[in-house]
Image: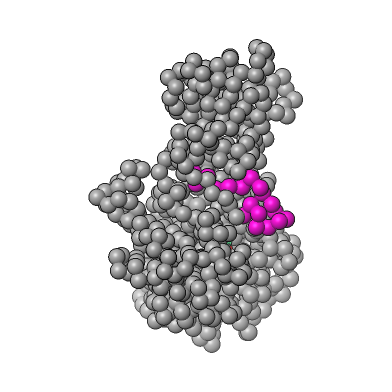
Amino acid sequence: MNKIFCAAALGLFSVASVAQTTINIDAKKPGAAIPSTLYGIFFEDINYAADGGLYAEMVKNRSFEFPQALMGWTSFGHVDVRNDGPFERNPHYVRLTDPGHGEKRTGLENEGFFGVTVKADAEYNFSVWARSADQKESKIRVEIINPASMGESQVLAHQDITIIDNGEWNKYKITLKPKQDVQRGRLRIFLVGKNGVDLEHVSLFPADTWKGRENGMRTDLAQALADLKPGIFRFPGGCIVEGTDLETRYQWKNTIGQVENRPLNENRWHYTFPHRFYPDYYQSYGIGFYEYFLLSEDIGAEPLPVISCGLACQFQNRNDDAHVPVDELQPYIDDALDLIEFANGDETTKWGKIRSEMGHKAPFNLKYLAVGNEQWGKLYPERLEKFITAIRAKYPKIKIVGTSGPDSEGDKFDYLWPEMRRLKVDLVDEHFYRPESWFLSQGNRYDNYDRKGPKVFAGEYACHGKGKKWNHFNAALLEAAFMTNIERNADVVEMATYAPLFAHVEGWQWRPDMIWYDNSRSVRSCSYYVQQLYSLNKGKNVLKTTDAKGKPLAGNDGQNGLFASSVVDADGSIIVKVINTSDENQKISLNVSGLKKKALAGVKVTSYTSDKLDADNTLDNPEAIVPTTSSDAASGNVYNATLNAKTFSVYRFEVK
Ligand code: AHR
């Protein structure tokens, strides 16, 4: 028995049926084309999304550049931190020298991100830059240990590395294969013998990274992104683009080139919420703009970088004093222009050459650029205008994304939308983290938007469940309901991205989030499955979808909490999405007109429901609530169905 019927049979919902609702789908005149970018993803390094998350590096503070140089490390014996290392922008390194007496040890241990977590018999690539400290050959031992081992030995894998005595820095690499799993392991390195050694950029990666790349990404997390088949990929933030102050804003030029020489930046999320304080959360930029562009290409999404507009975070600078004067904006504007060149320029250009030398000869074909994140007030348009003038002059085809501020409505929003129209941006970014009631009330949000003005980018949104801002099925269901409005208005909404994307269960600052993980497992939330149902059933053109009175189904009076939208796909299939947000099972009649001589010829129904509205998938039970698909016969032009309470169903009709 399918889960839905099972839930109803058990009486878990109130099962009184209301009258049948007719849903008219007009297949005669397909409407607006669905933009390829409509459903996408937004990545920000929040909740340990990059370091400690998607970025597969397992060593925290690998370059000893945290303000407390040994944060993340425990040292023993004679360890000195020095600052004249081989990498100009990350100059710190450690010197290990003989503690005296043959049995004493000098070395350090790294705690990783919430532990160094390894699997038995898997391979891990260790590398280090090293130099003999005494002009004599020296040796280090590298171990993966389980400090809490109850067995005979703590050591799960080990290998020695001989450091040659040429006085030069060299990169050394070994592969370690632990004999047991450990969740809260550590990486230990110590001196063997009397001769000292200098160590810099200590790194440990699983050999199995996504697409087998060096400096790569966690396979399960990158695959979860690819499985969403996103059309747009917004990065790298969010608030981290702006910085708490201008010095700590995200500067893309610091994130490219050799990883060893990408300077560390703070991560504002380490201190933004005092009740979720993570003093060891920094940005190594191991995933930088080159990697973001590459990831966009790999997952088939258009890249959408966001750059600083010269305003530091206005939430954190309430007196609006952390900004660049308008007449001093040129370096920021140059960063924008150079970024376009980095992405699209050929090898004869300065930045195109750098991209090519990093390994990507062909341009990334950047089409969109967002200037600023959640900015507001007059300070924003007066700066944005300067960027627009410069970008339009040099790169007229680039689509510029402006913002409507941090709120879905209100003063800031009402001021900025007309300003964005005046400045003729191509898209306006809207953000809404809102409760259930808001999502239920917004089914017509875009129906009356100005079709001649800029397009909409719903760049950050999520339903925050009552009181607890926590992932659960009901929030996902209401996101699905809201998305019918996005789909129906695909002529004005060009892209939409849920936020935030990732969260480490031990290191989150913000919830709900789309994908959760610990160091060895990950789980796709109900919101993930809703996003995926939309992106996998995106279709080609919108079809007019109305109730018996000719009104869009947006959960309004007389519509019994039903939301619906539909599209026609390239192969002629008709895809209808219906969400029953009510507590009652409902009979629906999908009435497809305009099929000419053709008729419905079978339907695949994918349904998403849960008998527990406040539940979600978990690391221990990652498939607790997943969509189920069944097939049914369909003929003529009408299909009658019962849509159970609190259910999102996607009907994909074959048409012959
Ligand atoms: O997604 C989390 C934060 O929410 C983003 O950084 C910011 O743009 C918004 O306030």
Q: Nearer the viewer, residue 614 or 268?
A: 268
Outermost residue, top side? 102
Q: Is residue 283 magenta?
A: yes
| Left or right: 501 as drawn, with respect to 384 | right
Q: Quadrant of ligand 1?
A: bottom right
In the image, residue 186 sits, relative to residue 405, either above or below, namely above
- Magenta residues span 269-286
- Res. 434 image quadrant: bottom right
The residue at 49%/83% (across/down) is 448
Q: Residue visible at 60% across and 38% down?
A: 69
The location of residue 554, given as percent across then percent down, is 57, 78
- Which colour assignment does the render follow? one colour
Residue 285 is left or right of residue 597, and the answer is right
119 and 539: which one is in front? 119
**Residue 106 versus residue 349 in the image, above or below:** above
Residue 361 visible in the displayed image? yes
The answer to whether residue 158 is visible is: no
- For the point 42% across and 51% down, the residue is 253
Q: Is residue 264 above or below residue 187?
A: below
User: Residue drawn 70% across and 54% down?
Assistant: 276
Provide residue 394's location: percent of width, then percent of height.
29, 65
| Residue 413 drawn at (x, y percent) | 54, 77
The number of callouts visible is 0
